[in-house]
Image (cartoon, rainbow, N blue to C red):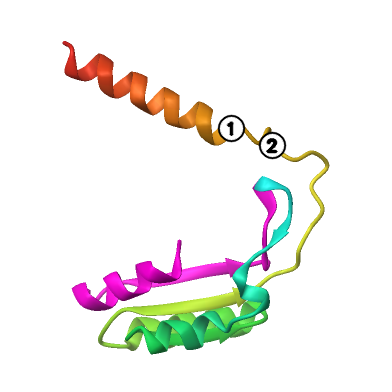
Amino acid sequence: MSPESLTIVSRQDPANLVIVVMDNSEFATTGGQPSLATEIDLAATAEVCGLAGYDAASLDELHDAYEAAMEHPGPALVNCKVETTELEEYPDPDYAHSYRNQFRTALLEETSE
């Protein structure tokens, strides 16, 4: 999810949406590059975009933040910090292209029937 998505959620203003981010501060599936979460506060970013923002650093805090977010009358984001873990093997960098191609093929097959 990109930060711009939060502005779209805010504009739509769904009363029953809680976004829960399990934040390990990296893009693990593409090689472990640091994410923007190492430089910005995601809950504060959500608030600037018009959502309620909550932080959690433990299971108890996650529970409390989620409950508070559910009681909020508009959309909310709960940012839960989790540990970064080392992957034994990173996915093939071309996996996204493979999924894209599978999706396109499936669409073309459906539209040609």
- The foreground one among 26 and 74 is 26
Q: Position of residue 101 (x, y in %)?
A: 43, 24
Q: Pointer 2 and pointer 1: residues touching (CB < 8 Å)?
A: yes
Question: Which one is in front, 100 or 54?
Answer: 100
- The residue at 60%/83% (across/down) is 56
Q: Which residue is mark 2?
A: 91
> Looking at the picture, does residue 47 appear above or below residue 38?
below
Residue 65 as seen in the image, left or right of residue 104: right
The vertical placement of 78 against 23, above or below, is below
Tell me the quarter of the picture where residue 34 sits. Answer: bottom right
Residue 72 lies, in percent from the top left, at 32, 88
Number of residue marks:
2
What amino acid is labelled 1 in the image?
Tyr
Q: Residue at x 82, y 53 (%)?
A: 86
Residue denoted by label 1: 95
Q: Is residue 106 above or below residue 47?
A: above
Horizontal relation, residue 92 to residue 96: left or right: right
Q: What residue is shown at x 48% (from left), y 70% (from top)? A: 20
Q: How packed is label 1: few (under 14 Cα within 10 Å), some, or many (20 or more)?
A: few
| Amino acid type of the residue tagged 2 in the rendering | Pro
Q: Quadrant of the C terminus?
A: top left
Question: Magenta segment: does it hold 64?
Answer: no
Can you give x and y, in whole percent of width and height, for residue 60 in the image?
62, 82
Question: Can residue 2 be seen at all in this image of the molecule?
Answer: yes
> Whole-percent x and y of residue 32?
73, 54
Magenta region: 1-29
Q: CA distance from mark 2 to mark 1?
A: 7 Å
| Residue 10 inside the magenta-drawn segment | yes
